[in-house]
């Protein structure tokens, strides 16, 4: 029996697949705060909760960095 290992080598963020949407700074900041509050009570012993928090926070951090870059007139690499 062979296992499908394609998911094991997938990257967390691929702009070609996931896009590069950057919200305005005020929205990005609000969403980041909401996501932090949403996952603040995640149990470090629950793999599913930790994984969901990590992915959600990665997305929000990329959006926040992109919004900050745009606000400063820089090209975002997030």
Image (spheres, grey):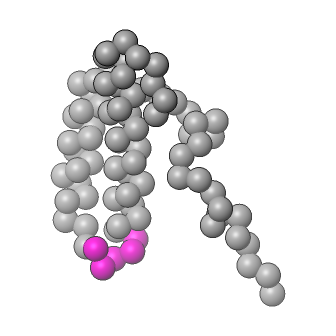
The answer to which quarter of the image holds residue 48 is bottom left
Q: Does the magenta stretch mainly form a helix, a strand or a loop?
A: loop
Q: Which residue shows up at 19% across the image and 65% down it?
A: 41
Could you say where residue 27 lies in the image, as x and y percent from the top left?
27, 28
The quadrant the N terminus occupies is: bottom right
Q: Nearer the viewer, residue 31 or 58?
A: 58
User: From this viewpoint, is residue 23 visible?
Assistant: no
On the picture, is 1 further left or further right than 69? right
Q: Quadrant of residue 4?
A: bottom right
Q: Is residue 12 left or right of residue 38?
A: right
- Which of 67/38 is in front? 67
Front-lying residue, 68 or 46: 68
55 left or right of 43? right
Seen at 24% across and 33% down, the residue is: 29
**Residue drawn at x 35%, y 32% as measured from the top left:** 65
Highlighted magenta segment, given as a residue range: 44-48
Residue with the most extreme bottom position: 1
Using residue 51 as the reference point, say whether residue 27 is left or right of it. left
Q: Position of residue 62 (x, y in %)?
A: 40, 38
Instruction: State whether residue 13 is above or below residue 7.
Output: above
Could one spot residue 26 in this view of the protein?
yes
Counting from the top left corner in percent of width and height, residue 19 is at 56, 33
The answer to whether residue 71 is magenta is: no
Residue 45 sits inside the magenta stretch: yes
Residue in view at x 63 percent, y 40 percent: 17
In this view, the residue farthest toward the right is: 1
């Amino acid at each position: 029996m062979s296992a499908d290992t394609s998911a094991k080598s997938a990257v967390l963020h691929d702009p070609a697949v996931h896009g590069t949407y950057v919200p305005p700074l005020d929205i990005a900041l609000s969403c980041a705060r909401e996501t932090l509050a949403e996952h603040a009570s995640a149990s470090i012993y629950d793999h599913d909760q930790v994984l969901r928090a990590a992915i959600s926070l990665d997305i929000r951090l990329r959006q926040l960095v992109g919004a900050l870059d745009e606000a400063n007139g820089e090209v975002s690499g997030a």
